[in-house]
Structures are given as structure tokens and as C-alpha cells.
Image (cartoon, rainbow, N blue to C red):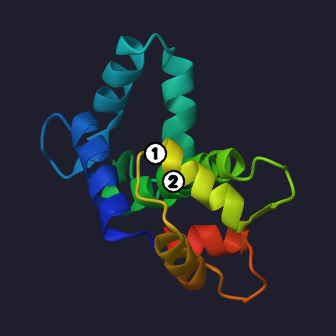
Amino acid sequence: KPLSPDALAELRVSFDSFDTANSGTISMAELLSKFKALGASEEEANGVMELIDSHHTGDISFDEFASAIGPLMASRKSSALKRAFDRFDTDGSGKIDRNELRSMLVKLGWNADDTKVDEMMRIADQTGDGQISFDEFKTLL
């Protein structure tokens, strides 16, 4: 799945923080400098370079960086979404019903009158079963 514009922008900021020479690539020296600042070893930096530098040029292009780090970001986001979903799903059924949705909206300080809850359920509940699954929740966000 292609990365969203927001995810690409976040990756660019991260990439640029490594590319201190503004060369458009991350050199081994730049990677090592960042790793040492984080308390990692030269051996660990070499291992990361080997993994990410898929074209074996001795430096890391933005495309290589995005290919390696992008899926990790997506996984992190998916984990965060699952935690949020689980907070809504107070009975642990794997689905969010009307009452759970209303309860969470109230906790968030939102207007949770019947009309608003019905409207949100109608938008989110794509299968029409009266509940919001995790997949429907992800699609909504």
C-alpha cells in the first residue's frame, strides 16, 4: 500500500535529520554520527547501512529509506489505531456498538446526542450490522 502524503512528509523530516550535508543521500559518516549520538555502535550502523542500502552504493537514498522505514511507520500507526479501537471496545467483543461509541464520545467531550451517534454509526458501519469492526474503524480514520 502506498504511503500517504503525511507519512511521506514525516519520512522526509526524519531522512533530512540524518542527511546533515543536505546531499540528498545519507552517507555512512552521517549514519554513524547519528547512531553514535543515540548510543549505538559502529557495527550496528554498518548493519543498518547494509540492510537499507539496497542498491549497494554506500549511501542511502530517500527511496531506500522510505522503503525500509515506511512499513515500520505503518505498523506503528496500525498498532496505535488498534489501541484506540480497544479503548472504544469496552466489552472486548471486537466491535464497537452504539453505546460504546456514545460513551467514548462523551469521554472525549463531544456532543453525543442520539442524532450525532446515529450519524457516526451510519458513516462508520459499512456492513450495516449495527457495529463498527476494526477494519471499518481504520477506514473511517
Q: Position of residue 87 (x, y in %)?
A: 67, 44
Q: Position of residue 15 (x, y in %)?
A: 30, 45
Number of callouts: 2
Other residues around mark 2 within 10 Å, as few (<14) / some (14–19) / many (≥20): some
Q: Nearer the viewer, residue 81 or 39?
A: 81
**Gap between marks 2 and 1 measured at Cα:** 5 Å
Q: At 73% from the left edge and 66% from the top edge, which residue is drawn?
A: 97
Residue that numbered label 1 is attached to:
108
Residue 21 falls in image quadrant: top left
Q: At 37% from the left edge and 63% from the top edge, which residue is drawn?
A: 63
Work out whether 83 lies above or below 97. Answer: above
Q: Position of residue 127 (x, y in %)?
A: 73, 89
Residue that numbered label 2 is attached to:
105
> Can residue 75 be spotted in the picture?
no
Amino acid found under the numbered disc labelled 2: Leu
Farthest residue, direction front? 114
Residue 43 falls in image quadrant: top right
Local secondary structure at mark 1: loop
Farthest residue, direction right? 93
